[in-house]
Amino acid sequence: MQAAYTVLILLMLVGISRLVARLIPLPLPLLQIIAGALLAWPTLGLHVALDPELFLFLFLPPLLFSDGWRMPKRDLWRFRGPILTLAVGLVLFTVVGAGLFIHWLIPSISLPVAFALAAVLSPTDAVAVSAIARDRLPSPVMLMLQGEALMNDASGLVTFKFALAAAVTGVFSLAEASVIFVLVACGGLVVGVVLSWVLGRLRGWMIARGWDDPATHVVFMLLLPFAAYVLAEQLGASGILSAVAAGMMQSWVDLLPRQTSTRLLNRSVWTLLEFAFNGLIFLLLGLQLPDIVKAVASHDLPLWSTLGARGLDVLAIFIALLVLRYVWVRSVSWLRFGVRHLRGHGHSSLDRSARSGWLLTLGGVRGAVTLAGVLSVPMMIAPGVDFPERDLLIFIAAGVILLSLITASIGLPLLLRGVVKSPDHVMKQEVQDAWKRTAEAAIRALEADDMTGSATPPDAAQAALVMEVKSRVMTEYRHQLEVFNDTKEAQALAWQMDQLERQLRLHALRAQRLELYRLSRQRQIGDDVLRQVLSELDLSEATLGVTK
């Protein structure tokens, strides 16, 4: 029962921290780390012992799957040059440069272990950056950071596994490792894509036979990242890349007909799951901080001088990571491809060289993946032989995560001062075109369909009924086309009418809901009727863009 109580307490804190973040001007990840550290304070004494392999399996696949699902694929392809240089080139550059620096700074950390630590410090966290920047980052910069975070999770952790294996076995061959890296990466991608495609075909087959219960489909999709991860690992491929590929493939497969309610439920469930898992990871980092500090300080005495020395080591490593990232960002010419798009996205006031370079540098915040990876370091390399400096590795990783969050919290708002994010006119125009085309397609379909369902001519009464209903529906679609009329006067009038109709519909829907509650309180309807009707009313209100 103690484990159940702990989970419930942590989930409650995840929700409370979101509310507190609205009152305290601190990024949500920092607040969650502080909350976890306070819980672990001796007076409260909440301790959570983490199994590294279980931690890695439970948290990474769904988070990576969700990142792959959410990433806009067209923008990912458009910024493929900068993203690849950040996600692959920068990871290798960081592993070599930071690994050599860590080994030089702390000789007790062997070179393979230093490379492993540098590899696990390479992945970035776009969710933490978004929470800090509060949607003020230029669109191209945010897209590059999102794409980098999506891909360097895989490249960094795969490199980390190779370095870790070299540290444990003492054997490493660059040529062999390069070939295995390509095979492992490609194998993971293939497994994820194939498994996601198979699940999509299975769901399509089920839906075609009327087996379209949304809860069943959502459960299948919840299990998909874990299945992709486990299957790839069993085949000797990368489970991390498999989860990412499954998410990216599923974002296409999910566009199946006759599953609107499934998509609504699925998005809600994954939004909740991603929020809870990210929050739990930062809370767990805070919970581990006292034990991490205690483990590092117990090796050497006195306490404060040891912590001071180790803290300086963490600061030096963090500065080295910043310098390496800034040098890479400024020296790689392909990154200019992404920077050129700044003016096209409403950020003409943004300096396109130095300032954008610093935004990309400070935007490389470390987060959940780094913590999950470093906690997966094994306790022992052999029976009775502890892994060398494991506590110190976790201490350094935790310190770098904290420093990157603090630095970004201070630096990004300063860099964004005076930068006004104007609307993305390209996206706005694409949305208008999409609405126009879909409304025109609906009108054409209604005009072509006689709605009789019979080869024999309908009687006059049925024909009149069909025409009346068709006219009513087509009027709504023609109104949608008027909203996107090119003249500003027509747009203003149509928008005013649309807002008035929306208010009237909301007023009617809420009156229906109140009447439904009254009928339920008076026992005139049962709970099953209440749930069914209330669900339909909520869906109708959701289509009007209301979230309360």
Image: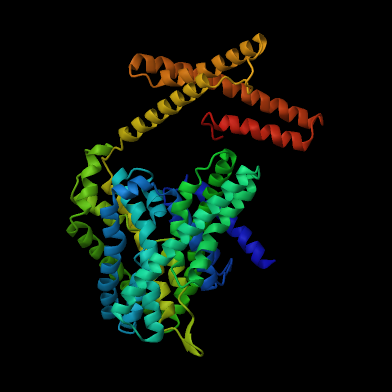
In this picture the colour scheme is rainbow
Is any part of residue 371 visible from this angle?
yes
Q: Residue at x 38, y 14 (%)?
A: 490
Residue at the (40%, 31%) spot, across then down? 434
In this view, 41 is above or below 451: below
49 shown above or below 31 = below
Q: Position of residue 460 (x, y in %)?
A: 65, 9
Q: Residue furthest front?
A: 456
Q: Nearer the viewer, residue 60 or 320?
A: 60
**Which residue is at a point 44% across and 48% down the rendered structure image?**
70
Residue 17 place in picture, x, y as percent: 52, 52
- The quarter of the image holding the N terminus is bottom right
Identity of the residue drawn at 52% across and 48% down: 271
Could you say which quadrant of the image residue 208 lies in? Answer: top right
Horizontal and vertical percent for residue 236? 46, 73
User: What is the quadrant of residue 296 in the picture?
Assistant: bottom left
Q: Is residue 70 left or right of residue 339?
A: right
Residue 405 visible at all:
no
Above or below 128: residue 403 = below
